[in-house]
Image (cartoon, grey):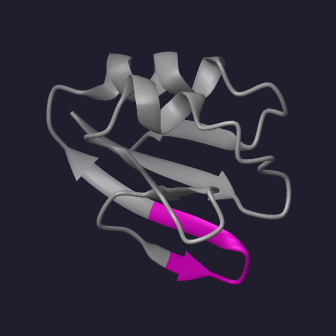
């Protein structure tokens, strides 16, 4: 399944729960905020596309974000 993950870096509060739950899709930046693993920056949004069976893990981690800074969408 192909899907895209976006992390709004302005909204991220660096609580770290996403990259603790799913280090295959989320990584910590220098400030403790989340980045998409292997992704790129589009303004203040970290974006990455995946084609694997990890959609549910990525979505579960996104659902735990207390400020809804993460979106996961099927392509």
Quarter of the image for the C terminus: give it.
top left
Q: Quadrant of residue 38?
A: bottom left
Q: Is residue 57 left or right of residue 31?
A: left
Q: Is residue 66 left or right of residue 36?
A: right
Image coordinates of residue 35 in percent, x first then y, are 51, 60
Image coordinates of residue 19 in percent, x first then y, are 45, 38
Start-end of magenta stretch: 41-47
Residue at position x 35%, y 17% from top?
56
Q: Is residue 72 magenta?
A: no
Q: Quadrant of residue 7?
A: bottom right
In this rendering, the answer to whether 56 lies above or below 44 is above
Image coordinates of residue 64 in percent, x first then y, are 64, 18
Q: Is residue 53 left or right of residue 43?
A: left
Quarter of the image for the N terminus: give it.
top left
Image coordinates of residue 70 in percent, x first then y, are 65, 41
Q: Nearer the viewer, residue 29 or 69?
A: 29
Q: Quadrant of residue 23?
A: top left
Q: Nearer the viewer, residue 68 or 33?
A: 33
Residue at position x 75%, y 43% from top?
69
Main secondary structure found in the magenta portion: strand
Q: Nearer the viewer, residue 41 or 35?
A: 35
Q: How many marks?
A: 0
Q: Residue furthest left?
A: 52
């Amino acid at each position: 399944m192909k899907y895209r993950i976006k992390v709004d870096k302005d909204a991220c509060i660096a609580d770290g729960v996403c990259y603790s739950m799913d280090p295959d899709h989320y990584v910590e930046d220098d400030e403790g905020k989340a980045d998409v693993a292997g992704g790129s920056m589009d303004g203040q949004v970290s974006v990455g596309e995946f084609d694997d069976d990890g959609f549910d893990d990525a979505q579960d981690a996104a659902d735990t974000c207390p400020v809804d800074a993460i979106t996961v969408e099927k392509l």
